[in-house]
Amino acid sequence: MNITVQSIKFDADQKLVDFIKKKAGKLDQFFDNIIESVCYLRLENVDDEANKIVELKINIPGSQLFAKAQAKTFEEATDMAVESVRRQINKHKTKTRTNASNHKELLNKEDEF
């Protein structure tokens, strides 16, 4: 899987980029057909301490998954975004399996006629 990390209006250090690539790379365990991942890092100009935003976009065949998380640190926001995408992957796989099994049942019923 190809993982791209883009920091908007600032330069992210290599440790942060490596952390994000390691966390996003673990999504391969849940879904083999991930085409690419793009991670956007952004600082929001607010008085709140939780001004770090991570947006994670995952391209899979036939769909695109997206998660956005805001926290005090980029690492914490990355953990939340990756967890959100992991749940979306599980939901997508469940839907796909259900549709495939329903399709097989319909084909079997047509064969009976």
Image: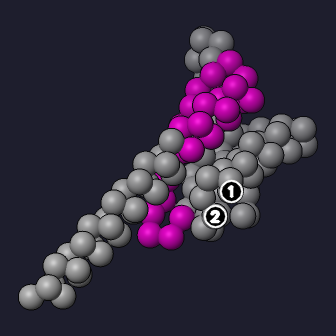
Please name the amino acid that badge 1 sits on: Asp
Given residues 20 and 103, the one toward you in this image is 103
Q: Position of residue 86 (x, y in %)?
A: 56, 44
Could you say which quadrant of the image residue 113 lies in?
bottom left
Pointer 1 with pointer 2, Cβ within 8 A: yes
* Residue at horizontal 73 percent and vertical 64 percent from the top: 2
Outermost residue on the left side: it is 113
Residue 106: give x, y in percent of width and height. Answer: 20, 75
Location of residue 37 by image quarter:
bottom right
Write the residue at 43% across / 48% down: 91
**Residue at figure coordinates x 29%, y 75% from the top left:** 104
Q: Position of residue 45 (x, y in %)?
A: 61, 23
Question: Is 37 on the left or on the right of 4, as rendered?
Answer: left
Residue 38 visible in the picture: no
Image check: 104 left or right of 44? left
Q: Which residues are magenta?
A: 60-86
Task: Check the picture and name the quadrant holding the N terminus.
Answer: bottom right
Assess whether residue 61 is covered by the magenta stretch.
Answer: yes
* Residue at image mark 2: 32
- Helix, strand or loop at disc 1? helix
Mark 1 lies on residue:
28
Write the residue at 36% across / 56% down.
95
Number of other residues with Cα within 10 Å of mark 1, as a class: few under 14, some 14 to 19, many 20 or more: few
- Mark 1–mark 2 Cα distance, whole angstroms, equals 5 Å
Quadrant housing residue 92: bottom left
Q: Secondary structure at mark 2?
A: loop
Name the amino acid type tagged 2.
Asp
54 displayed left or right of 107: right
